Amino acid sequence: MKKILALILVALMTVSMLAACGVKTETAASASESTEAAASAPAAEETEAAASDETASSGTSYTVGICNYVDDASLNQIVENIQSQLAAIAEEKGVTFNVEYDNCNADSNLMSQIISNFQADNADLLVAVATPVAMAMQAATEESGTPVVFAAVSDPVSVGLVDSLEAPGSNLTGTSDYLDTAAVMNLMFVQNPDLQKVGLLYDLGQDSAASAIESAKAYLEGKGVEVIERTGTSVDEIALAAQALVSDGVQAVFTPTDNTVMKSELTIYETFAEAGIPHYTGADSFALNGAFLGYGVDYANLGVETANMIASILLDGADPATTPVKTFDNGTATINTEICEQLGIDFDELSEKFAPYCTKVQPIVTAESFGDVQ
């Protein structure tokens, strides 16, 4: 009797495995057929809508590989919102997104390995969080043409990821956290009209920082302000650079959306605060980690819109080459109220001064990550 039961169990397991394999093969075929159908379908809106509905309700499964550049509050917030929005879309459309996630921690060798792993798993689409990852994925998918959606790339045109924001031109598109540098400079002078010496703190190796730094220099030098640049490529080097800026006697410091400085902010914010120097930065996560002010896009919304773009490509057959890069209003000023108090600045008065120059002014207190905010 035991032998008979064992044989029955083996038979059932075999049938189950064959069924699972059949689903995977059918999924791949369905995706291929959907692509061919989309290519040959008429341009009529009714036909496109019908094809989209059929794809959405087919129970298709897609593999999405997400590589994050570094563990920091802004980029982590993007990833969290991509994942939650994809889950919501999957439930609504009756599809499955198998999300594979990894963080390379700014290690180029690890980054390459992560991307190779995604490709070995036949990922249907790759997601690059931050410029260095996007550039690596661009090179890795040059032959395969696997769609790549990037997130938080400040200047995708200047680094050669896309031909233009309106028409990317290849297998890459995504969302940009482009920073309006002049707007940050304006706030700096609203707070202190008598600035004579300003420090620029950044990582020379961060492509995302290059254009913003050039814009800041042009703005400040145009006002006759002395500019002192200090750079670093690691937390220790950024800490030394921050101390050097204090010794230089700068009256304010500007950092764009630079991931190396972002990773270092919890280490350096007290250096500036104790010296009475406000640190103006290009993202709200800097202010969360102790900077005086973060100015830029809403990274939660950026993550949601990145997920919507992923779904559009996979479910609706949108072509990355003709899908415009999405940009956002970056007029949100996030002010750290604890640093305000330490610098002797009244938050309410400052908010009133900043209001005409911002879409929104919001307070925040120092914490390790967005998950720590009460």
Image: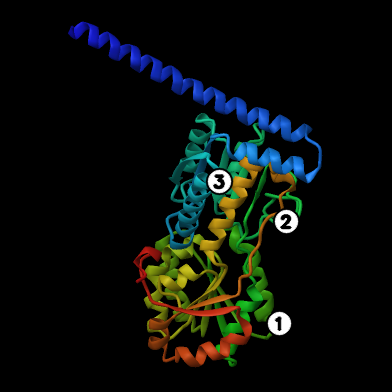
Residue 136 position (above or below residue 268): above
Q: Are marks 2 and 1 in contact (CB under 8 Å)?
A: no
Indicate the secondary structure of the residue bearing disc 3. Answer: strand
| Residue for point 64% across, 43% down | 313
Q: Nearer the viewer, residue 13 or 276?
A: 13
Q: Position of residue 240 (x, y in %)?
A: 42, 69
**Res. 147 visible in picture:** no
How far apart marks 3 and 1 lie (CA) works out to 39 Å
> Which residue in the structure is indicated by mark 3?
127
Question: Is residue 225 depicted above or below 147 in this figure?
Answer: below
Q: Residue 300's x, y, as percent?
A: 51, 62
Quarter of the image where one finds residue 62: top right
Q: Is 116 or 372 nearer to us in this picture?
A: 372
Query: For the residue carrying disc 1, how many other residues have a C-alpha within 10 Å: few (<14), some (14-19), or many (20+)?
Result: few
Amino acid carrying label 2: it is Leu
Residue at x 41% of width, y 91% of height: 344
Give the structural element (helix, strand or loop) at label 2.
loop
The answer to whether any part of residue 349 appears in the image is yes
Residue type at numbered disc 3? Val
Indicate which disc, 2 or 1, sits on the residue closer to the N terminus: 2
Quadrant occupied by the C terminus: bottom left
Task: Please identify, in this view, whether the residue under mark 3 or under mark 1 is nearer the observer.
Answer: 3
Q: Nearer the viewer, mark 2 or mark 1?
A: 2
Give the residue number, with chain letter if any, for mark 2.
Answer: 165
Could you tell me which residue is drawn at 65 percent across and 28 percent down? Answer: 32
What amino acid type is highlighted by mark number 1? Gly
Residue farthest along the left direction in this orientation? 1
Q: Nearer the viewer, residue 171 or 240?
A: 171
Residue of label 1: 222
Query: Residue extending furthest right?
Result: 43
